[in-house]
Image (spheres, helix red, strand yellow):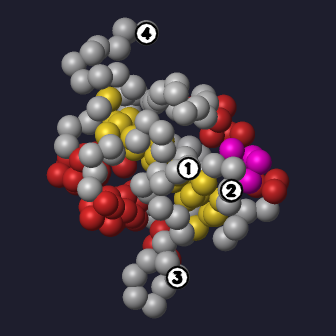
């Protein structure tokens, strides 16, 4: 379902506030990557593997969300939709709305409570997966498609976060 202006503004405001979204072609990363996130480099992903990336994220979102629970797909400065992943994609169903691979725009999948989702950065050419459940379900699949994460919890692997 395409979002009305009020809902569109609300989800973008909440996403920006929660993740510190800062669009830029030069300053990376584009969000404050949460502790329960992993970010993969997309720069070497062969275009023939885009479908595998898309399928992995679709499958994992279905696994993480119960039927009837909706997710937003946000295309920065363009449309936003809200949909139930269990009711789209596949035979006899409407197509999955939106892409995972950030082809020229920020593409975001996120639950209404912002607990899990993906953030595709078109200029850094990265995909950040956040939310412990989604990250756990995607780690192996994305590892097969994309290799080792570029960052975990917003840090390069092996870099420890200071204790709070």
The tag on residue 80 is none
Image quadrant occupied by the C terminus: top left
Q: Main secondary structure of the magenta part?
A: helix
| Mark 2–mark 1 distance (CA, rounded to whole Å) | 9 Å
The earlier-in-sequence mark between 1 and 4 is 1
According to the picture, the residue beneath numbered tag 4 turns out to be 164
| Mark 3–mark 2 distance (CA, rounded to whole Å) | 20 Å
According to the picture, the residue beneath numbered tag 2 turns out to be 78
The earlier-in-sequence mark between 3 and 4 is 3
According to the picture, the residue beneath numbered tag 3 turns out to be 94
Q: Secondary structure at mark 2?
A: loop
The earlier-in-sequence mark between 4 and 2 is 2
Q: Which of labels 3 and 2 is toward the front?
A: 2
| Mark 4–mark 2 distance (CA, rounded to whole Å) | 38 Å
Instruction: Identify which residue is drawn at 64% across, 63% down.
Output: 81
Q: Are marks 3 and 1 in contact (CB under 8 Å)?
A: no
Q: Are marks 2 and 1 in contact (CB under 8 Å)?
A: yes
According to the picture, the residue beneath numbered tag 1 turns out to be 105
Instruction: Identify which residue is drawn at 32% across, 29% down.
Output: 151
Residue 11 in magenta stretch: yes
**Residue range highlighted in magenta:** 8-12
Residue lying at the far right of the rendered structure = 6
Q: Position of residue 146 (x, y in %)?
A: 24, 47
Which residue occupies the foreground of this view, 35 or 97?
97
Is residue 12 visible to us here? yes
């Amino acid at each position: 379902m395409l979002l009305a202006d009020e809902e569109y503004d609300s989800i973008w405001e909440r996403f920006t506030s929660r993740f510190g979204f800062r669009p830029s072609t030069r300053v990376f990363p584009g969000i404050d990557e949460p502790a329960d996130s992993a970010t993969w480099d997309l720069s070497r992903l062969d275009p023939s593997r885009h479908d595998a990336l898309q399928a992995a994220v679709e499958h994992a979102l279905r696994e993480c969300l119960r039927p009837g629970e909706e997710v937003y797909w946000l295309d920065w400065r363009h449309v936003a939709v809200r949909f139930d992943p269990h009711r789209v994609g596949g035979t006899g169903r409407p197509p999955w709305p939106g892409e995972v691979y950030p082809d020229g725009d920020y593409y975001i999948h996120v639950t209404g409570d912002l607990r899990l989702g993906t953030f595709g950065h078109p200029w850094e050419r990265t995909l950040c997966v956040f939310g412990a459940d989604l990250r756990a379900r995607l780690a192996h699949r994305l590892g097969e498609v994309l290799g080792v994460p570029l960052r975990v919890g917003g840090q390069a692997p092996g870099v420890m976060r200071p204790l709070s």
